[in-house]
Image (cartoon, grey):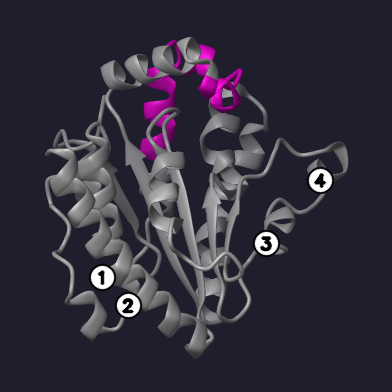
Amino acid sequence: MNDERYEAELQTRQLALVRWQQHAMQAGEKVLIIFEGRDAAGKDGSIRALTEHLSVRATRVVALPKPSDRERSLWYFQRYVGFLPAGGETVIFNRSWYNRAGVERVMGFSTPKEQEDFLREVPSFEAMLIDSGLKLLKIWLDVSKAEQAQRLKERADDPLKALKASPMDAVAQEKWDAYSAARDEMLKRTATERAPWTIVRADHKKKAHLALLSHIVGQLAPPEIAGSVEPPDPDILFRFELSDLDDGRLTR
């Protein structure tokens, strides 16, 4: 996909997003979009493509640091609740409460009991949010091991990407299999009919961005707006099903 075609298709989707947000603000809709994925899967770039032309006042991107000692003593979901959207707002979590099912599990930052409690409780917690009128989308960006290695190397070599670097980068490849197992358990236990996971195969950044924006427009916008963009490429973006754990659609 050349740059000219990509920019044209991206603009079409971003225009639809602007029209959707105008509608959502007027209707007082509460929208939460969760971005999860492996390290270097493209969360930051995907969020930039999504928010580039959205309202600064009505859109918030939340990327929380590691919890303080006080926050670790709270009910786990408590530190996230204060960031949830009010009417007319869209909130985007760049990583979320699902840290407990991913990095905390792999790196031992929480206990097995805490991890099990989370997996048991989160479907009910999300159902309560949806019952309150919140619209919830959950996105998992999947990337191959080779592509992750290349992106992590580029991040380490580029001084302009120094702020994206994390101590977790050093072990992402080493603990690849552990992260795969954690992902599979999380998807299996927390994908529900009302709060499903959407998988984006993100090795090709441009195709991933276009599929992702098409999906968000299709899920959130009224039909007259959603119909203005092509549906996402099913080879790039699909709703998670249990069969995906065995059919090769998720990276190993």
Q: Amino acid at mark 1?
A: Gly
Residues under numbered marks 2 and 1 in contact, where contact means CB atoms less than 8 Å apart: yes
- Specify whether residue 93 is painted magenta: no
Residue topped by disc 1: 218
Name the foreground residue: 137 vs 186. Answer: 137
Q: Which residues fall within the magenta stretch? A: 160-185
Q: Nearer the viewer, mark 4 or mark 1?
A: 1
SS at circle 1:
helix
First along the sequence among labels 3 and 4: 4
Q: Tell me the quarter of the picture where residue 248 sits.
A: top left
Q: Is residue 208 left or right of residue 5?
A: right
Mark number, residue 83: 3
- Of all residues, the one furthest to the front in this rendering is 4
Alpha-carbon span between mark 2 and mark 1: 6 Å
Does residue 127 appear in the picture of this structure?
Answer: yes
First along the sequence among labels 3 and 2: 3
